[in-house]
Amino acid sequence: MKNASASRRAFRQGFMSEAKQSSLEPENCAEVRDSFQGALDAIETYFERNWTDGLPIVPPVPELIQRMLNAVDRKPHEVLGAVAPRMGEATVEAVAINAVMAGCKPEYFPVVLAAVEAVLEPSFNLGGVQATTNPLAPLVIVSDTLGVKLGFNSGYNCFGQGNRANATVGRALRLVLSNLGGGHPGTGDKSTMGQPAKYTFCVAESPLSPWPPLHVDQGLPKDSDGVTILACNYYPVEAYNRKGRMGREGQVAGAGLPSPERDDSDDNSDVEILESYAEAVIFYPGTQCANFGGQVGIVINPHLAQILAKQGWQRRDIQLYLYENARIPRGSLPTLTSEAKGLAKKRWPLWFNLADAHKPIPLVKKPEDYIILCCGDAYRVFGAVLGPWSSLGGAAHSKVVRRAEDVTRDPQES
Amino acid sequence: MQSAYIRLPNPTGIVRTRKGKTAKRLDSLDGKVMGVIDDAMVNAHVLLDALAAEIEKNYTIKERVSIIKENWSASLPREVYDDMRKRVDFVIVGVGVCGGCTAGSVEDGVQFELDGIPSVTVVEDLFQPLASAKKELMGLSEYEPIIIAYPMGNDEQAAAKGRAIMAQAVSVLTGRVQAVAAA
């Protein structure tokens, strides 16, 4: 039959008929035996059709998809937007399918949905983020209270392996970017090197953070749960006191760590911590910032964050410190392409261009372009810098996470 | 009794593409206003300038309108695009030498075609698959960007590449194979 044939053709190509609103319509589905062998066959089928990230998926059986949909108060066919560059429609249902495939629990689904909504904001420029030769990946940052509630890891090895929530939520976003957005290596994703975070990249803010959650800092309600997205690269930082207490011996012995309990009023451990970050920003993403601008993530573990907070450092203070101190001479700005044509005048504040060659200039346009995040183990000195892609896109975007039970409790919705 | 088979969905969703048409080709470039859209990539301006100059040498171009994109990884802002569309008879766009800039340039080139203005988009061979995917998604699979060999090279090499594709560019814009030899 002609129509059936056309549907099969569309299915093979990964493009569904416009007339079909649901990915669960028979014409759009693969059939496998309802058995253990059928599940294994399904995994292989999804590999064959290039519908995975290179790892086995959980077969998205209708029952599991429905469990995802039950976790949000959204219509399955509601369209969140089109995922660039392929422009596959991100319906709630399509995102749910990919969340199942990633191994998400249903309670994670509202987080996945909010993350997808964040990357679909036009100013995030997902088409550029996906297609760029830069290795960056969108990082999903889950707010502290929600992270605790859902079991996200914000402590030891929080950017690493070993936690289902972190691993599967980050993976779900990646599958959405690949399957709906066509972000496949060599076509929709032209990254020269890629990075491991392209498999999954998700972390939660620490409940020990002395500062408000990021999404609140970005202007969302204080009493909300939120997700923040930042497209970035990860660079480790060792933030230490160079005046002895955190010297080599101290680190090995675990002694001499700067402590929030100690009276630090007469030392400058706070400044030395921040100096480490300022140096790391210059050393790691400095050239990228100088070339292309963008936002820089500053990841501070709860231990160091509390030392800073105890000495009065709020997010804004840290942003201002880094803006003032992470600088390079104007003359070291590359004079490639746009700079040569005067576009730098538009990309940077005018005074950057008026500065002489020796004048130190900041690596971001404005202090708020430092995104301060608190997570990690509370007892050591490591942190991280999250390098940007450019001022062309990938900046921090936050969304409120709304679960079905939240909506039910909301008196305005009843 | 349980069904013997179970349905599993396609996770790639719906793509709503519109089937578009390329613009009517020009009879000649003589007397036409030429738009040049430089995506600000390394030496893109050198290549495009050489191409534009070569066109001007062979045809009586009424005016050249040039712009440099502020965001090479996206299509032109609406107001800039609209202004350009009103002012030009054809455009040359490029150069796609990275992921974002290829997507952005092809999107611009295709959009001009869809709006009735013939365009030439120049893309490096390494980014041809992305360019192909982009034009197809925009419903214009017959659109053919001009492909140059990697690397674009230094000023001299980029200019040579620009001059070398002049006849091809004119063919794309007029729909006729050109006998005009590159200088």
Image (tube, coloured by chain):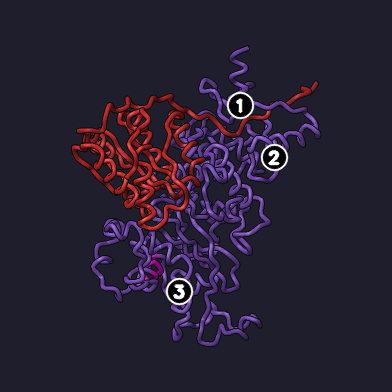
The residue that disc 1 covers is: A11
Labels 3, 2: one chain: yes
Along the line of sight, the residue nearer the viewer: B55 or A262: B55
Q: Nearer the viewer, mark 2 or mark 1?
A: 1
Chain letter matching colour red: B
The residue that disc 3 covers is: A279
Q: Which residues are magenta?
A: A316-322
Q: Residue B94, relative to residue A319: is it above or below?
A: above
Whether pointer 2 and pointer 1 mark residues with C-beta atoms closer than 8 Å, the reply is no
- Mark 2 and mark 1 lie on one chain; the one further toward the N terminus is 1
Give the amino acid type for the residue marked by disc 3 in the picture: Glu
Q: Nearer the viewer, mark 1 or mark 3?
A: 1
Q: Chain of mark 2?
A: A
Q: Chain of mark 1?
A: A
Disc 2/disc 1 C-alpha distance (Å): 20 Å
Q: Which quadrant of the view contains residue A153?
A: bottom right
